[in-house]
Image: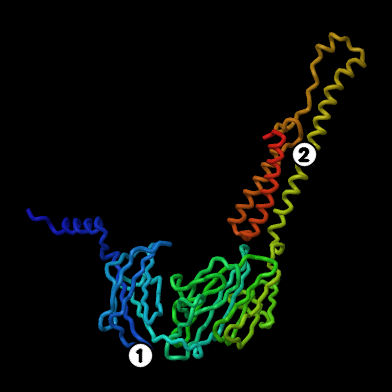
Amino acid sequence: MRPSGVPAAIVLAMLAISIGVPTAATALTIRGAVVKGDEKRPVAGQTVQLHVVRGNEELKGSTAATNPAGEYQFDGLKADPALSYYVSTEYENAFYTEGPLAQDQGPTVTHDFVVYDVGRDISAVQVKNHHIIIERQPDGLHVTEILIFENRGRTAFLGTGPDHAENAGARIGLPASINGFQQGMGGDPQTTHVRGRELSSERPIPPGVRPFSFSYRIPLSGRVDLSHRLYFPTASFVVLLDDPKLKLESKALEYGGMRDQGGKQYAVYSGATFGVGQEIQIRIGGAGFWSNPKVYPWLIAPFAIVGALWIAARRGRRVRAAVRAGRAEAPSEAVATGVPAEQRQAAPPRPAAALPLTQPQGGGTSDADFRKAYLFLIASLDEGLERGEFSRETHALIRQNLKRRLQALLAEESASGVR
């Protein structure tokens, strides 16, 4: 008996799922073309690589070569929000990378590469605008930098990298001690490198105007160094600062008043016409440890605990003294009033004053009270860090102080044989 069409379709669908073949609902195609220059001439035989990334792990990708029309295509991909797709190609030792590509534009994603002949003539390249936006947050200064590159030549610029062993397009000297670097427009993590204070990109700077942006954090300190070294002629250099309590010092920049941007007020500092290799010295004051008011309760807390426990100890000694006095007073009163001995023995004892249930033996307070208090403070401090109330550096400083006091207390307990 011949099976009907519906069961056969179900069997085929289940088979496709079992062997991992993308169905029509989940299939994705990435295609595009590689063209050269402003004339958009097709580049045949050009290798294009597909990179597949899940989280921080790069999975197995694939490679395709362009046809005579300069076109490439990757079929049978899985449309999965957990996967990110990147495409890249290398032309004349210059890397071109794009991604992650959007997967919400239908079953086909299109991206074209425009490649250029590469030159090393820096005279046609400049930074039209270099903007630095500084926003103060509990964990440090959040810095966003936006550079607008202009290449007036007909070839893409690719110069020498920091170690002279690799090529570099965009390049800049960053401040020291930056954290959490993230690439923005005009670059990607695969081709942008930060080594010490040096940032460099393997991407060339193509003809025309192109943005290049990135962000990072700087820990709070009494005097933040935000100096930059320039590797391209820079027409305009602007710093925007969102906290009026912070003071920027720089001989190369002038204060230009306040500016409203995105609903926030920023202090503006700017300068113009800087040369290649010039170092712009920038210092920011007022962002130190003591400028964060949330740290003061943690500095006062250990002394407050000692004072509270000392008061509790004195109060406990007074209560015990009163109880002892009350117990001694009953027999003496009976003798003074002439009560016979047999009646004094039959008289019910006077009830003693109640003592606190948590009273430690041998004293109104003990080292255990101090130990519990310090452990509670350390736990609360860790929770404050998770809520972003202060920076990791501030957290580490206060936690180390509390931990040192706790270790000293434990050492005294060990020496006295009490635990």
- The residue labelled by disc 1 is 39
Looking at the rendered structure, which numbered label has been put on residue 272? none
Compare marks 2 and 1 and give the one earlier in the sequence.
1
Residue drawn at (21%, 56%) of the image: 15
Report whether 77 appears left or right of 255.
left
Dot 1, crowdedness within 10 Å: few (<14), some or many (≥20)?
few
Distance Cα–Cα, label 2 vs label 1 = 86 Å
Q: Is residue 309 above or below residue 250?
A: above
Residue 310 image point, x, y percent: 78, 41
* Amino acid at circle 1: Glu
How far across and how far down the image is residue 267, in percent? 66, 77
Q: Nearer the viewer, residue 87 or 120?
A: 120
Q: Which residue is mark 2?
A: 312
**In the image, residue 333 above or below residue 185:** above
Going 42% across and 88% down the picture, which residue do you hit? 155
Residue at the image point whose x is 65% and y is 78% from the top: 281
